[in-house]
Image (tube, rainbow, N blue to C red):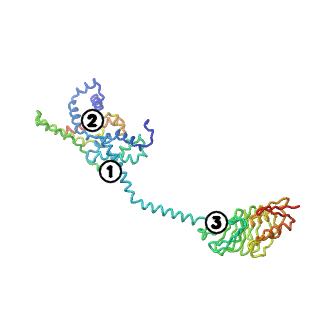
Amino acid sequence: MAKDIRDNICDENLFSSVFSKHSKNLHDFLYYKFGEDLNPKDKVQEAFIKLWENCGKVTPSKAKSYLFTVANNLMLNEAAHKKVVLKYQKLKPKTHTNETPEFILEGNEYMDKLQKAISNLSEAQRTAFLLNRIEGKKHKEIAELLDISTKAVEKRIYGALKKLREDIKEI
Amino acid sequence: MEREELIKKWLDNELNSHELEAFKKLEDYDDLIKLSNSLMQFKAPEYDSTQELHDVWHAIKSSKSTVSKKTHWMRPFMRIAAVLALALSVYYYTTTLDTSINTLAAQKTSIELPDASQVSLNAASSITFNKHDWKKERNVTLNGEAFFKVAKGSTFNVTTSTGTVTVLGTEFNVKQRDNYFEVTCYEGSVKVTHNSNIVILKPGHSFLNIDGKLIATEKETSINPSWINNESYFKSMPFAYVIREFERQYNVTITPHNINLNELFTGSFSHNNKELAIKTITLPLNIEYSFKDSTTIELSRD
């Protein structure tokens, strides 16, 4: 990588730029993979602190995979592989609405189904799918983030979509 | 198949306008859009990376101070350990350090070794031994001339640059000067190793090697080497060695002119009277001497 003029990231400015480049992606990745219960924000922070403590051993090009591995391990240490249920923001009921109560009820039902279906996805499917759908990431970006091929990303995302739709119909 | 392709492209936001039209005509288009829109409600909470970075720096800086606090209790121990290590190494260094005793020209000294063995050191000589290892092995390194009275015990070694003398308990004299190596046994028995030669000396016998040549010597009758009694005694000795011994005993420089230094000399000189001593070595060989100054003597023959 052209960026590797230095062989470590002990420089505060460099560290900060690494942070702004990767922290959000790392956070989103952790959130979609493990859910909210395990405090993805804290894990991101811990991972970056670990990176700073070991800054002499990590080259800038290795920083991303180092962070993702560390954060993932931090999560796995705590997660006893319980089922991840992502929360959805309840739409604020409008004070005046011309929608029928049935319609609103139906909408809530749909969301509950969707929530269940999402938690039935595998970790790999859910992470790739939600990064794509919610964060709007291209397949290629996700592939880089997860260190897998674009083909694999495509497979995961499409697989997730298929499974979601089947589940929703069934429930 | 085409449907799957379209959905995949839609997922990657890669549909062109033509394909988009086709996609919209799919029967499950509404379903997909509904799903897609609903999914947005599962969005991860906002992540403010500027604020988070600030927090990380704060955590790193405060953890630094806790880290130093953590090591705090170790510090006094570290100090004690450092002092101990230092004291131990000084102790070890001093005890394993060799003891060395030197004499200058015109100087003699007597040393008692750790086991009460006696060593008399002649002028311009040095002896080195190790007090710490003494119980394990009695080793002495000699450079010059010394008379040993060795107490009974384990093997006693005298190492010189030209040969090694090994004894059990005895009295003997070792003289090692330049190309000169002489061992005389006065009591007990002495084993001399010189190059690959091993010679065992009985009382009164000597081992003499000059310039690598073994020289036969007569039996010694005195009980001490002559220099112990402040006299140097020579028997059929090349004159050069006599001069060198004289220089050592009186701390002078002798410059010979027209003199055959290989001429053999038999006799002795005293260590107490320079004037008398120079006479005793020059007169028998018919040599003139003159004092240039207090430390230089010139010898010449008419």
Kindly state the secondary structure of the residue where label 3 is placed: strand
Q: Is residue B205 above or below residue A81?
A: below
Decide if residue A171 is in sight here: no
The secondary structure type at the circle numbered 1 is helix
Query: Separation of disc 1 and disc 3 at Cα?
Result: 66 Å
Q: Looking at the rendering, which quadrant does residue B237 occupy?
A: bottom right
Contact check, label 1 and label 2, Cβ < 8 Å: no
Q: Residues within 10 Å of mark 2 (few under 14, many from 20)?
A: many
Q: Chain of mark 1?
A: A
Mark 3 lies on residue: B100
Q: Residues within 10 Å of mark 3 (few under 14, many from 20)?
A: few
Residue lying at the far front in this picture: please name it.
Answer: B293
- Disc 1 target residue: A77
Residue A122 position within the rendered picture, expressed as x and y whole percent measured from the top left:
28, 42
The three-letter code of the residue at mark 1 reads Asn
| The label number, if any, that marks residue A133 in the structure image | 2
Q: Among all residues in the image, which is located at the extreme right?
A: B302
